């Protein structure tokens, strides 16, 4: 078992747990973006979000919502960001499905990623490709 999160689930590595049930675990990130930054994971190992069964994802996000509300109240946050890095190119470091809940306060100085502009009909062309891919996934799974 090389997965850090699986080791946390099995109490091999300690963590600061904020929530646990039979299927999910939430604990404080050891390198928080802001105080209260929490990771919510399924206890079962899935390498990535897109490899996690849809029914698990649905239940995961029900738990994420509860955790986010608890964090907001617990650290007096004004809002929160949800983050999910899927694959190494997206910044995923630990290959176990997890959602970051990052509490935010007004004027906390944290910035989101930079935005860019589409050129010409690029937006329509990209949307067309995505629609075709979604249609194919819906038909073929």
Image (cartoon, rainbow, N blue to C red):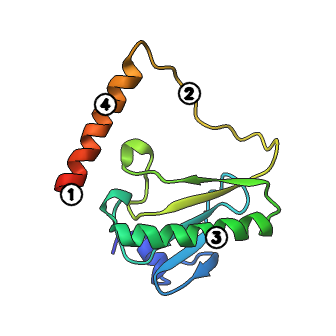
Q: How crowded is mark 3: few (under 14 residues within 10 Å), some or many (20 or more)?
A: many
Asked if the residue under mark 3 is in contact with the one under mark 2, i.e. CB atoms within 8 Å, the reply is no
**Residue at coordinates 60% horizontally, 72% vertically from top-left?**
27
Q: Name the residue under label 1.
A: 141
Q: Quadrant of the N terminus?
A: bottom left
Asked if the residue under mark 3 is in contact with the one under mark 1, i.e. CB atoms within 8 Å, the reply is no
Q: How crowded is mark 2: few (under 14 residues within 10 Å), some or many (20 or more)?
A: few
- Element at label 4: helix
Q: Work out whether mark 2 precedes mark 3 in sequence or the reverse, and give the earlier one.
A: 3
Q: Work out whether mark 4 precedes mark 3 in sequence or the reverse, and give the earlier one.
A: 3
Q: Mark 2 points at which residue?
A: 115
3D distance between C-alphas at marks 4 and 1: 19 Å
Q: Work out whether mark 1 precedes mark 2 in sequence or the reverse, and give the earlier one.
A: 2
15 to 89, vertically: above or below: below
Q: Where is residue 83 in the image (x, y as percent from the top left)?
A: 54, 52
- Viewer-nearest of labels 1 and 2? 1
3D distance between C-alphas at marks 2 and 4: 21 Å
- Viewer-nearest of labels 2 and 4? 4
Q: How crowded is mark 1: few (under 14 residues within 10 Å), some or many (20 or more)?
A: few
| Residue 41 or residue 116, whichever sits in front | 116
11 to 100, vertically: above or below: below
Asked if the residue under mark 4 is in contact with the one under mark 2, i.e. CB atoms within 8 Å, the reply is no
Q: In which quarter of the image is the C terminus?
A: bottom left
Q: Mark 4 points at which residue?
A: 128
119 to 48, vertically: above or below: above
3D distance between C-alphas at marks 4 and 3: 36 Å
Q: How crowded is mark 4: few (under 14 residues within 10 Å), some or many (20 or more)?
A: few
Q: Work out whether mark 4 precedes mark 1 in sequence or the reverse, and give the earlier one.
A: 4
């Amino acid at each position: 078992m090389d997965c850090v999160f699986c080791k946390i689930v099995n109490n091999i590595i300690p963590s600061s747990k904020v929530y646990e049930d039979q299927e999910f675990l939430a604990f404080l990130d050891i390198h928080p973006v802001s105080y209260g930054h929490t990771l919510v994971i399924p206890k079962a190992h899935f390498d990535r979000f897109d490899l996690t069964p849809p029914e698990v994802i649905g239940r995961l996000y029900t738990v994420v919502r509860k955790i986010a509300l608890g964090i907001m109240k617990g650290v007096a946050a004004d809002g929160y960001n949800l983050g999910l890095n899927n694959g190494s190119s997206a910044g995923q470091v630990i290959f176990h499905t997890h959602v970051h809940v990052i509490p935010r306060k007004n004027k906390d100085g944290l910035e989101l990623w930079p935005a860019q502009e589409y050129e010409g009909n690029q937006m329509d062309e990209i949307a067309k490709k995505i629609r075709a891919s979604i249609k194919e996934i819906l038909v073929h799974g």
